[in-house]
Image (tube, rainbow, N blue to C red):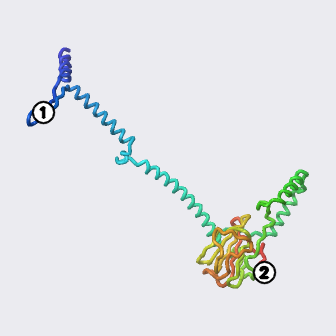
Amino acid sequence: MSDKKEKQKKIARKLLDKYRLVILNEETFEERLSFKLTRLNVFVIASISTIVLIALTTVLIAFTPLREYIPGYSSTALKRKATELYYKTDSLQQIISTNKRYYSSIKKVLQGDVSAVDFNRDSIIQAVKLEASDVDLNPIEEDSILREKVDKEDKYNLFESATSASNFVLFPPVNGPISAPYNLKEKHYAVDIVVAKDTPVKATADGVVIFAEWTASTGYVIIIEHSYGLISVYKHNSTLTKSQGDLVKAGEVIATAGSSGELSTGPHLHFELWNDGYPINPTNFIDFK
């Protein structure tokens, strides 16, 4: 035990023994500076200096722009720009996807690559009559009062919503003999009307032009979107007088007839009608003579 205590006293004396650090002029040996030190003081000062240095380095890295120059750390501005670009890219991808679906549907209309349903107006009317005969259509008193009130409101309503589908009329885009009728089996979802070259082609109803471009197979093509899910297509024109996005009225000239495109054999108008994505026979609704 005594030996152990003596060793501890020797270690304590070594730590507490005082030393003098003197800085002299090498030529004149003049004393410039002197310090009284102990080994314990040197250890404490070195430890505190190390801790302070580590703390300052941490602060510089964590709270100043200097961290951007250290490998492994990224710029805050760069992260913000990357996030903005990510959202912009996502928005552009959605827009591109929407445009692809839109152009795909237009392409199907142009190529006629759509499942067809032959709408027969007479059969539809007959089916409605058969269904209506099974229902008691005699109006009750409350229904009659409501109908009278609505009729009075619509009578003086100047908005477009007051019009009904019964007033929707289709006009012939051109007049002339039909050289190729509507034929589902041959996938000819249109009627070809023979006309002289440069005959004015008119809009069959009010609408907006959704396509007006040149195609290799069908020449100058113009497509108009109307009310009630109806789309009309005019192909093989020699010139177009309307552009995409234009509003047109029924009977307004939208093109001049011709024989443009690889599939044309002479001056005529290739005219199609589509309702909710399905082709319909134009002769059921339009008299081209």
Q: Is residue 37 left or right of residue 201?
A: left
Which amino acid type is shown beneath numbered disc 2? Lys
Q: Can you tell which mark lies on residue 24?
A: 1
Give the image quarter of residue 135.
Answer: bottom right
Tell me if residue 125 can be seen. Answer: yes
Question: What number of labels is visible?
Answer: 2
Residue at image coords 14%, 30%: 22
User: The C terminus appears in which quarter of the rendering?
Assistant: bottom right
| Mark number, residue 289 | 2
Residue 287: x, y in percent? 78, 77
8 or 52, nearer to the observer: 52
Identity of the residue drawn at 46% across and 52% down: 81
Image coordinates of residue 137 in percent, x first then y, are: 88, 57
Q: Is 260 rendered above or below residue 167?
A: below
Which is nearer the eye, 121 or 87? 87
Check disc 1 and give the amino acid type.
Leu
- Closer-to-camera residue (228/116): 228
- How much space separates mark 1 and mark 2, taking CA atoms? 123 Å
Question: The residue tagged with tag 2: helix, strand or loop?
Answer: loop
